[in-house]
């Protein structure tokens, strides 16, 4: 029941009639006195396993704002020019296609003019508001209707005075209908008065364009100018995402999964369609999910979005200037071109565009094409594959950046826009733009390159980058490796042992990138000589090595090249200043925004960050709404955390690990710990230099709040061991420099005992996690450390006091700087036992009960036949139980004659008038015999034979090997002689009596059993297996 969800538990409790309080079987005399639930204060009378938190109603806030121009318009009816013909000629007129009419009508004068004759048939017409018309002179006629390309025979009724309103469609009416420009000539006609009304009796002319194209609807300028701004918020989805963030297995350091089928297909598409152009880099295709993709015409949707962005730009002149400059830059550089060719059917898509403003870079505007824009229940991204995961691990790139003394950083300028898209896919990248004008249709453009926002763009860019590097690998192996393994998307980060090595490899990296039309810029280093080659490059930015305030943002962290240290990028631009300064208690929304603004990919700030996450978790426990302030109990904790958070601004850690490159010995030390609040792991380098001195530096850490579901401390300690093994394995995998030894430290002797016992001794939760740690660690590598010296403890409790760069969290425990002989030693505890709650219960099957004890008591039977029949009945009953267990449980249904013609209803018993309802007449049920098949009789005999043999000739007997082995169904010879004589080891029932049988001269079974005298003389119908044998034969 524990594995089921809450609804499943309630269902099981109801199905098995369990008490909702104690989950025991609810008998008729059941009187449960179990206390109320009390889970999170719940006072209802149910078991804690049946408790559920009532989720608030899903809040969906949807606001739709519609902007239209209030101009007078005109509604067009479905009127089309047609030609009517008959015996006397033809007549050009117009027809009204009326979906609400059940009959086709024609003006009587027009029918006479073309010579359409027919029989007289009076007609009654009912119209709006109950109006009625009696057309007594109506006739049924047949006419020929000529459309633009086809001719149709139509039956109609004549009527005098049809009087339909005239209508005309000219060029003015189609001026604002930009989507109709291609068929404009087919829709226009001069003013005409309809003389025929086509109704549902000629429905095929109404639902298809059998006659010609027809224009109908409103013609106001707001037809194409209606803009809808839709805002929708589903807070329940946000709650679920945050809860998922706090789950126990969301560790974020899992290895990459094998490629899925879509990724394999995407890789094949890239391999087949990516080609090298001359000096313009590479050209490739979009990664379509299907070869034959059909996209709807979303021109109107993109047009409405254009109107929206134009209004926004008109309200902000500075934004408008920057936005227009960005569009002009795309066109000027050839990244976009005019779409002058005819759109590709089914492969044309219009991308809306919008402005993205960087909060940390005022005035910088990025124009992004919206590939996620949905129209007709689809979007461009819905039809594209994301492609293979070629992105390097963010943690790995940063770790390798810290290996050596000389560090260099740069990034690729306009990486996506440097890759061309083949012409047959460019129509799917169309967009609308009309510069500064606001009248007339916009100009259609299409992108010629990979765009920002498409789901396949990152995969395409990484594939081209790596492909270009692999082609140069033979000539420049080190530079090719740098491009593949030391780039995170367009950012290049690498460290070197010497300046000469840095100069050589960076020069080759830049040369290889230029082969793919990629250009590196913003070169930065902690040593000016390392990038001396790029001083004359116009793309390089000035580096002030004598200015300590100079800093570079690299992958979310701040790197200060002069001091060669890393700091934290605390981006609180979207958080109110009074919250950051601790002047006001935040709401749940503001608290989440503050905590999530701290980006710490290596976990270096875990002792502080974990406290904020714990406050968030407690906020979720209280059930506070998004825009409600934190409860008073949490408000004081929040204020304390804000003060601790300010310490991060002044903390700087060395970028490079001390003496790692030139060390004589290298070790990885991983510490793990857990508490009721959180569990954590932290990894350190310990290196020995040539002088024998030990140097310790922090590599990375991982801390998680304890799960919402209550978990025991030993389990949390074990979970900490799991993430410690994962994190250490990540470090070993990502670093180019490998350790000579590994050590894992825990202050939990229970966990250490579990790891040494192995996974087979425990229940699934513990067993699975022990098995995972065994995959990457050896049990001999695990050691005990006192809690006072366990540095992982700093990330599981309150923030340590005086938390600065000199704290033991950053420098490691002091004992690591001493010799191994001085490290903590585990004290022996002989009374330490494995937790019985976690130990696996092993069920052992025993067969100590003899066969004779499981058979009926022979003293209760007066004859052999009665004994055998009773035993056979038991065997038959056992078989019936087995059959019922293995049979399909069909659902009962009420029978009736319709479903089962062979079924007959049982007649109800009639009650006589003199009989009282309170009186019942019970007739004695005649006793019915039970049929026993011969096979059960034989099996019963065989069991008794074996029982007697086992009793007299045990396993120590010399005759044991030649006694037949009998189970519940077959008899097989046990001895070697019989095995050699028969190829089959199993005897049929018919062969049982022919086996050599050894019976005792005098046993518990009376001698009458062997002589067959248990049946009275002369009795008929009795069968005895030994009635045709002599007593001497059995002896």
Image (tube, rainbow, N blue to C red):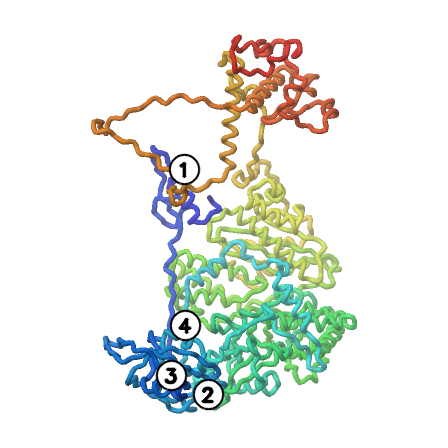
Q: Residues within 10 Å of mark 1 (few under 14, many from 20)?
A: some
Q: As displayed, is residue 405 above or below residue 876? A: below
Mark linked to residue 152: none
Q: Nearer the viewer, mark 2 or mark 3?
A: 3
Mark linked to residue 317: 2
Image quarter of residue 914: top left
Percent x, y of residue 792:
57, 54
Identify residue for label 3: 95
Q: Nearer the viewer, mark 4 or mark 3?
A: 3
Q: Quadrant of the C terminus?
A: top right
**Position of residue 911 in the picture relative to residue 616 (left or right):** left
Disc 1 or 3, which lies upstream in sequence?
1
Percent x, y of residue 465:
67, 73
**Dot 2: element:** helix
Q: Looking at the image, which is closer to me, 1030 or 615?
A: 1030
**Dot 4: element:** strand
**Position of residue 94 in the picture relative to residue 739 (left or right):** left
Mark linked to residue 231: 4
Look at the image and tell me whether residue 756 can be seen: yes
Disc 2 or 1, which lies upstream in sequence?
1
Disc 2 or 4, which lies upstream in sequence?
4
């Amino acid at each position: 029941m524990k594995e089921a969800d809450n609804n499943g538990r309630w269902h099981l409790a109801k199905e098995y009639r369990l008490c909702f309080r104690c989950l025991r079987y609810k008998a008729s005399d059941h009187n449960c006195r179990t206390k109320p639930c009390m889970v999170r204060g719940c006072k209802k009378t149910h078991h804690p396993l049946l408790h559920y938190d009532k989720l608030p109603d899903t809040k969906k806030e949807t606001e739709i704002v519609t902007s239209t121009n209030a101009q007078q318009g005109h509604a067009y009816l479905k009127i089309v020019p047609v030609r009517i013909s008959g015996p006397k000629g033809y007549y050009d007129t117009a027809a009204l296609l009326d979906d609400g009419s059940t009959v086709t009508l024609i003006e009587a004068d027009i029918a006479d003019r073309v010579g359409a004759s027919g029989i007289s048939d009076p007609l009654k017409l009912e119209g709006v508001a109950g109006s009625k018309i009696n057309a007594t002179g109506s006739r049924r006629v047949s006419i020929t209707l000529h459309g633009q390309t086809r001719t149709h025979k139509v039956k109609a009724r004549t009527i005098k005075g049809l009087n339909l309103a005239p209508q005309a469609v000219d060029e003015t009416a189609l001026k604002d209908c930009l989507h109709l420009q291609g068929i404009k000539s087919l829709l226009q006609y001069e003013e005409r008065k309809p003389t025929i009304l086509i109704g549902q009796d000629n429905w095929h002319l109404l639902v298809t364009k059998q006659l010609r194209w027809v224009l109908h609807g409103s013609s106001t300028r707001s037809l194409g100018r209606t803009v809808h701004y839709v805002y929708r918020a589903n807070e329940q989805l946000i709650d679920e995402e945050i809860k998922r963030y706090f789950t126990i297995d969301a560790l974020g350091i899992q290895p990459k999964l094998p490629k899925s089928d879509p990724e394999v297909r995407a890789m094949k598409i890239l391999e087949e369609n990516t080609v090298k152009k001359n000096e313009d880099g590479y050209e490739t295709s979009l990664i379509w999910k299907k070869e034959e993709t059909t996209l709807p015409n979303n021109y109107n949707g993109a047009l409405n979005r254009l109107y929206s962005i134009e209004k926004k730009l008109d309200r902000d002149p500075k934004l408008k200037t920057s936005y227009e400059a960005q569009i002009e830059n795309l066109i000027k550089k050839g990244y976009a071109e005019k779409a002058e060719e005819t759109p590709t059917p089914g492969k044309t898509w219009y991308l809306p565009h919008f402005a993205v403003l960087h909060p940390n870079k005022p005035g910088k505007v990025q124009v992004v094409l919206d590939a996620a824009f949905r129209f007709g229940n689809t979007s461009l991204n819905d039809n594209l594959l994301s492609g293979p995961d070629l992105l390097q691990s963010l943690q790995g790139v940063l770790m390798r950046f810290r290996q050596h003394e000389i560090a260099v950083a740069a990034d690729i300028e306009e990486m996506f826009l440097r890759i061309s898209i083949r012409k047959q896919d460019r129509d799917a990248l169309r967009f609308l733009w009309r510069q500064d004008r606001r009248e007339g249709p916009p100009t259609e453009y299409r992108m010629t390159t990979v765009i920002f926002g498409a789901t396949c763009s990152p995969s395409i860019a990484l594939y081209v980058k790596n492909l270009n590097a692999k082609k140069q690998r033979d000539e420049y192996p080190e530079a090719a490796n740098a491009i593949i393994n030391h780039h995170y998307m367009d950012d290049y980060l690498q460290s070197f042992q010497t300046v000469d090595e840095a100069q050589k490899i960076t020069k080759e990296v830049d040369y290889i990138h230029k082969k793919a039309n990629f250009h590196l810029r913003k070169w930065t280093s902690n040593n000016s000589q390392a990038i001396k080659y790029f001083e004359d490059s116009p793309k390089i930015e000035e580096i002030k090595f004598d200015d300590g305030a100079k800093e570079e943002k690299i992958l979310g962290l701040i790197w200060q090249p002069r001091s060669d240290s890393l700091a934290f990028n605390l981006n609180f631009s979207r958080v109110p200043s009074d919250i950051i300064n601790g002047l006001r208690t935040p709401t749940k929304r503001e608290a989440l925004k503050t905590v999530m603004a701290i980006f710490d990919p290596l976990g270096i700030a875990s002792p502080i960050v974990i406290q904020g996450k714990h406050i968030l978790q407690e906020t979720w426990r209280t059930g506070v709404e998004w825009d409600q302030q934190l409860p008073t109990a949490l408000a004081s904790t929040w204020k304390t955390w804000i003060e601790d958070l300010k310490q991060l601004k002044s903390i700087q850690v060395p970028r490079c690990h001390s003496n790692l490159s030139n060390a004589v010995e290298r070790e990885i030390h991983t510490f793990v710990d857990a508490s009721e609040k959180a569990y954590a792991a932290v990894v350190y380098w310990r290196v020995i230099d040539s002088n024998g001195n030990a140097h310790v530096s922090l590599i990375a850490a991982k801390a998680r709040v304890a799960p919402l579901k209550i978990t025991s401390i030993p389990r949390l300690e074990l979970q900490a061991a799991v993430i410690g093994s994962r994190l250490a394995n990540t470090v070993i995998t990502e670093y180019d420099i490998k350790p000579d030894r590994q050590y894992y430290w825990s202050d939990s002797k229970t966990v250490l005992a579990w790891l040494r016992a192995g996974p087979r001794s425990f229940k699934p939760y513990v067993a699975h996690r022990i098995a995972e740690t065994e995959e990457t660690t050896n049990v001999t590598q695990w050691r005990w450390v006192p809690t006072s010296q366990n540095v992982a403890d700093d990330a599981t409790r309150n923030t340590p006091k005086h938390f600065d760069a000199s704290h033991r969290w950053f420098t490691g425990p002091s004992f690591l700087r001493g010799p191994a002989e001085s490290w903590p030693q585990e004290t022996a505890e002989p009374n330490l036992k494995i937790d019985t709650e976690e130990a696996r219960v092993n069920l052992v099957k025993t067969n100590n009960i003899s066969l004779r004890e499981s058979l009926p008591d022979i003293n209760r039977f007066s004859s052999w036949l009665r004994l055998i029949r009773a035993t056979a009945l038991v065997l038959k009953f056992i078989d019936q139980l087995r059959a019922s267990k293995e049979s399909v449980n069909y659902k009962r249904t009420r029978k009736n004659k319709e479903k089962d013609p062979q079924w007959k209803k049982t007649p109800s018993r009639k009650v006589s008038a003199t009989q009282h309802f309170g009186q019942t007449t019970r007739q004695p049920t005649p006793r019915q015999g039970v049929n026993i098949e011969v096979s059960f009789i034989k099996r019963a005999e065989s069991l008794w034979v074996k029982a007697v043999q086992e009793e007299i000739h045990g396993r120590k007997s010399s005759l044991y090997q030649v006694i037949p082995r009998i189970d519940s169904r077959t008899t097989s010879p046990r001895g070697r002689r019989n095995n050699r004589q028969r190829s089959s080891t199993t005897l049929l029932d018919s062969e049982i009596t022919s086996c050599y049988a050894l019976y005792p001269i005098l046993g518990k079974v009376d001698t009458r059993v062997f002589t067959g005298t248990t049946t009275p003389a002369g009795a008929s119908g009795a069968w005895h297996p030994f009635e045709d044998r002599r007593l001497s034969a059995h002896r």
